Amino acid sequence: MKRSNLVMGNVSCNADKISKGKQAKKLFYVRSNVGGNVGRVQPFHISSKEKAYYTLKTKVGFYREELEEMQKHFNLKGVFFNIPFNKISSDFVDLDRQDKVYASLEYDVEVIKKLGVILNRLELDDLPFDNDDIAFARGLLIILNNITDCAEIVINYYLSNENLVQIKANKDEAKINKIYDHLEKFINQRKNCISDVKEQIKLLESRISRDSLLLGIKEIINFKGKVGQSVSLMDTLAITIWSLC
């Protein structure tokens, strides 16, 4: 199943108005306490561009740490999910791709268990080229993989520490603010997308017949559906961030 097409479009920005003329500056003082006497050291200035850059850098750092901490506290060995990755696609035998599936469900143990129950109710033993169950199951895993894969590309590649240094050196304040705004939109969009997927999986478990189960999975993986459009918007925001960097 092909990944949803990336749609480039005009994305509205809510960046703060940038003052023209003299660069806005803030004054900072470094104070030291030596021998009980508080002394004031020569003040230094930070420009509005530097402030924008450090705001962006801090946001990237916090989000990267958040993703890493969620993975660190996930005890895969302590839980049995029984997700039939090997029956669905050889692509998902890779443990890193499996982890991205878990990450896209926020490592929610109960939801991951429900995903395993759902996938094991499908007929996955026939040949893959003539089996809708395998095709739909693979499409669901691909959607989940892409939700986290896209975030890792944005945080670890587009906004890597090396690229942030280049952004600081080569981009003006307005461009840095736009990158920040689009990163905020991307993070919120991913959060909403994950919430929608988790809710759909919970609803899928209650479906009794195999046909209704397949119909529910098809709704999730349809690129014109709610989740499909949400993932496509994530892709668009990611590309926009890259184009601004």
Image (cartoon, rainbow, N blue to C red):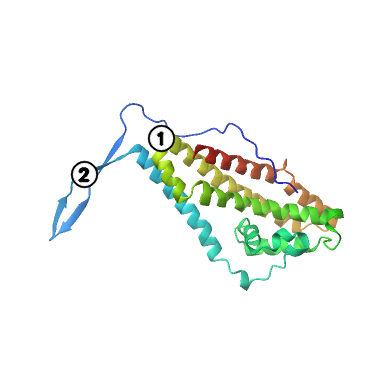
Q: Is residue 174 visible?
A: yes
From the viewer's perspective, tell me whether residue 187 is left or right of residue 137.
Answer: left
Q: Residue at x 39, y 46 (%)?
A: 54
Q: Are marks 1 and 2 in contact (CB under 8 Å)?
A: no
Name the residue carrying label 1.
172
Instruction: Using the image as rendered, state which of residue 91 and residue 33 is in the foreground.
Output: 91
Which numbered disc covers residue 43? 2
Q: Provide residue 72's location: percent of width, then percent of height.
A: 53, 65
Q: Earlier in the sequence, mark 1 or mark 2?
A: 2
Q: Identity of the amino acid at label 2? A: Pro
| Residue at left offset 50%, top offset 57% | 66
Residue type pointed to by label 1? Asp
**Residue located 63% across and 51% down the image:** 147
158 is higher (above) or lower (below) than 101: above
**Residue at 46% in and 46% down:** 163
Q: Is residue 66 above or below residue 16?
A: below
Instruction: Give x and y (percent) for residue 40.
Output: 16, 49
- The CA span between labels 1 and 2 is 24 Å
Q: Is residue 26 left or right of residue 151?
A: left
Q: In the picture, residue 205 is in which quadrant?
A: bottom right
Label 2: which secondary element: loop
In the image, is residue 30 above or below residue 109? Answer: above
